[in-house]
Amino acid sequence: MESGKQVTDIYGQLVFNDKVMRERLPKDVYKAVHKTIENGTHLELDVANSVAAVMKEWAIEHGATHFTHWFQPMTGLTAEKHDSFLSPEPDGSVIMEFSGKELVKGEPDASSFPSGGLRATFEARGYTAWDPSSPAFIKDGSLYIPTAFCSYGGEALDKKTPLLRSMEALSKEAVKVLQLLGDKDVTRVTTTIGSEQEYFLIDKEMYMQRKDLLHCGRTLMGAPAPKGQEMEDHYFGVLKPKVSAFMHDLDEELWKLGVPAKTKHNEVAPSQHELAPVFETANVAVDHNQLTMEVMKKVADKRGFACLLHEKPFAGVNGSGKHNNWSVQTNTGINLLDPGKHPAENTRFLVFLMAVITAVDKYADILRVSVASAGNDHRLGANEAPPAIVSVFVGDELAAILKSIEEGKQYTESGKTQMEMGAEVLPHITKDTTDRNRTSPFAFTGNKFEFRMPGSAVSVANANIVLNTAVADALEEIYENLKDIPAEQLESKIRELLRSLLEEHKKVIFNGNGYTEEWVEEAKRRGLDNLKSLPEAMPRWISEKSIELFTKHKIFTKEEIMSRYEILLENYSKSIHIESLTLQEMVRKDFMDGLISYSSAVAGEAAKKREVIPDLNCALETKLLQKLDCLSAKILKALDKLSEDTAEAEGKKDVLEQAAYYQSVVLEDMEVLRAYVDTAESMIPESFLPYPTYGEMLFSLR
Ligand code: ADP
Ligand code: MG
């Protein structure tokens, strides 16, 4: 922190937030903007002009010379194109200009962004549209305006448009149900998200020496260090001074940008850390998570680190995820997933809880697709992250309450006498840390659900688009069942409905350990999917059920669904293709160089010794050379196979078939090659290798 400054002084100082708008905008303009934000209504051009003028003044005062529409194309990253405010005058001087039109709409030449064939049939141009509900901010001398990105035909080419649509759909369906339940003053419901971000920090110099990290974000080979995470001494451990200084800078940069970074700690794997923000409205939280990832990388670079956001940068230790804490809140301030003191009697809570359980069970496969990526495949299903089987953890107390509903009985607390309705014997469900199940992919954690499957590197938009839509759909089903029921019968009809929904969907509830082999078996018996890889999961995205869900709630058109299908599969194949080429190059050039120079040094040693004593045995040198030679032969063979299979994969025409080939053949080849290389590497001293080892990368930070 700059001396003399407090967090409250710097927080949001680079953000055109509500406070700034209230202070600077004319009252009627401020009101109009608020109406747009709250009701999602259209903004008139004269209002936009007025906002733009004030925004420009404010931005220039804060050192900005440029503005950019900031959007989230299907690359999963953010995109920007900067224009200066500058406008030359006939007399040779300049003025700084920024109009309402420039604020509201942009026309980036966007033909090189992935569109999955969508834009090909239209013009090559896309357009960006201001999202006034996510505040503009200043970064590196530019005013950043969060926007949605569409084609001229109105098809979504980004992650924000469908996210906003899904929030809208959820709000619409939730309000209908709430009105029915008697919450007449609720007119709008927002999705709230707090997305915890895991990451690794390693020394920048070491990062630069590894082509796999540079090109792929993860190591493709490397013998394990003698120590891993088995001592469990890193989790919540004391922060090392350099890491602590990084986190300090990171917080400060994020706070200036109005990103509510709240918690920081060491994670389970060596060199792994986590940052958790305070939750916000979904689209703002998604924007802020993108910013967080970007600022993490930037601050790391300044501090001599590389920040790795990949889901599995190192084999043998935990990977990174992004825990997506999710809830829904009414415009009257009620958290709909807060059980309150008496969850068993809290009909509203039980209805929303059941809607989530229904949604997750019914659309488990599409939720699985929403978190699928080449990187995340390494994590899901491994013995650390939640498994690829989607299940819901509700905890003991809620499980007991649900059981009582199912059996049509009154809820009794175990060991206590049967309670009367309204009695004070029910404990308030607190966020009890003992009631935590860290192995569940979708866990109820007191007053929200924590979806733990999203990967660390990708936008959380996808996961929330699917989650919002699925819950909206379940709520609609609930509404349709209840809408014609006379008021006096409503309560009992709700119980009946909850019971039948539970009956149908309870198979997704699992409170045990999700990492065990028994669960895999049990899940199979229950008929739950275990979609282990992206190519296995993707066909579900274009299933009839999926198309019906998304088109019914107006989240995606069929064309948009198809385009996303192609983009995801192409992206997956490309990622593995690049990994394969990188591994081949690293083995051929870097590893072989180390292997050859070490072998010749060993041979040289033996020769030198024999100059002194000609019939010396040289057992050590001989043995080493033989072992390395034997491994070399295997490495060469595996390398050839990888190279041939990669060429074969590249030639495949069908996107799904291609991705499946990369997954089942090329990735497998890479594993085989890596195993030989790692064995050989463990015999070669560090000084002979032109890149740092796992031990050096994971344990050298001070
Ligand atoms: P932990 O899970 O480590 O115990 P918390 O439960 O306090 O920590 O919060 C974890 C994350 O969940 C934080 O990012 C927090 O802001 C977020 N969170 C808390 N309440 C909600 C909510 N109602 N909606 C969405 N996210 C929430
Ligand atoms: Mg958590």
Image (cartoon, grey):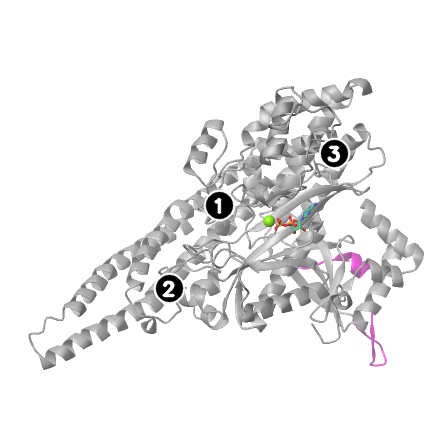
Task: Name which residue type carries label 2.
Answer: Glu
- In this view, the residue farthest toward the left is 615
Residue 44 appears in the rendering: no
Q: Residue tagged by mark 3?
A: 173
Mark 1: few/some/many CA within 10 Å (<14, 14-19, 20+): many
Task: Name which residue type carries label 1.
Answer: Leu
Task: Name which residue type carries label 3.
Answer: Glu
Q: Residue tagged by mark 1?
A: 380
Viewer-nearest of discs 3 and 1: 1
Q: Residue tagged by mark 2?
A: 585
Q: Mark 1 falls on what kind of element?
A: loop
**Spot occupied by residue 139 in the image (x, y as percentages of width and height):** 70, 67
Which of the 4 quarters of the picture holds residue 604?
bottom left
User: In the rendered image of this protein, does residue 512 appear above or below residue 375?
Assistant: above
Q: Point out the image quarter for the N terminus.
A: bottom right
Mark 2: few/some/many CA within 10 Å (<14, 14-19, 20+): some
